[in-house]
Amino acid sequence: MITENGIVTKASQTTAWIKTIRSGSCEGCSSRESCGTSHNSMEMIVTVKNTLGVKKGDQVVIGLETKPMIFLSFLLYVFPIILLMIGAIIGDSLAPTLKMNQSLCSMTLGFLFFGAAFLFIRKKQTSLTQKDEFKPFLVRKKKKPDSSSCQIS
């Protein structure tokens, strides 16, 4: 599980808005533009279900499951390459039947399949964003430091 510390900036009974600092792992994420991150800011606001009854000012830990992230990584990075290769192989074997240049047919079908992969991903995106397993969630509420135990001598 991926976790991040944050502070509740606003809360209702059903939803909490958590301000967190963008970590280094955000830089390589393909979804960083759509998850609430400001383009130039290191801070981001994440909306989560308020399952722990947090209030404004509470320090919390939010989490995101690893399994869905691995699936999304496969979908975004590996799936298009697989379709590119399948298209190229099909184009290479169809070229003699169509009496075309093998390289040109292979390249054309490869790029068509590659483009089709991104169209598929784009259509799949809407259904995936609705599923709870792809959304961050509250892990725990952090305890506030006890100011009475701190004494200045």
Image (cartoon, helix red, strand yellow):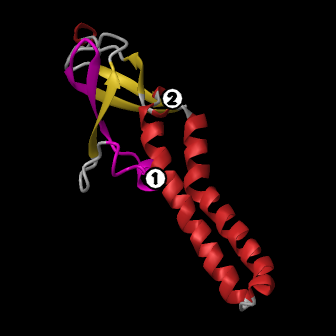
> Going from the N terminus, do you reach mark 2 or mark 1 first?
1
Count neighbours of disc 2 (C-alpha within 10 A) and say few if under 14, some if 14 to 19, many if 20 or more.
Answer: some
Placement of 99 over or under 19, stated as above or below: below
Indicate the amino acid at tag 1.
Arg
Residue 115, image x and y in percent?
A: 53, 67
Q: Residue at x 28, y 9 (%)?
A: 149
Indicate the amino acid at tag 2.
Glu
Near-viewer residue (75 or 91): 91
Mark 2–mark 1 Cα distance, whole angstroms, equals 18 Å
Q: Is residue 151 magenta?
A: no
Point out the residue furthest to the front here.
98
Residue 73, image x and y in percent?
A: 57, 50
* Secondary structure beneath label 2: helix
Residue 37, image x and y in percent?
A: 29, 46
Q: Is residue 26 magenta?
A: yes
Residue topped by disc 2: 133
Quarter of the image with the C terminus is top left
Quarter of the image with the N terminus is top right
Among the 4 quarters of the image, the one containing residue 80: bottom right
Placement of 55 over or under 122, stated as above or below: above
Residue topped by disc 1: 122
Span colored in magenta: 8-35
Among the 4 quarters of the image, the one containing residue 47: top left
Disc 2 vs disc 1: which is toward the camera? Answer: 1
Is 101 situated left or right of 67 in this image?
A: right
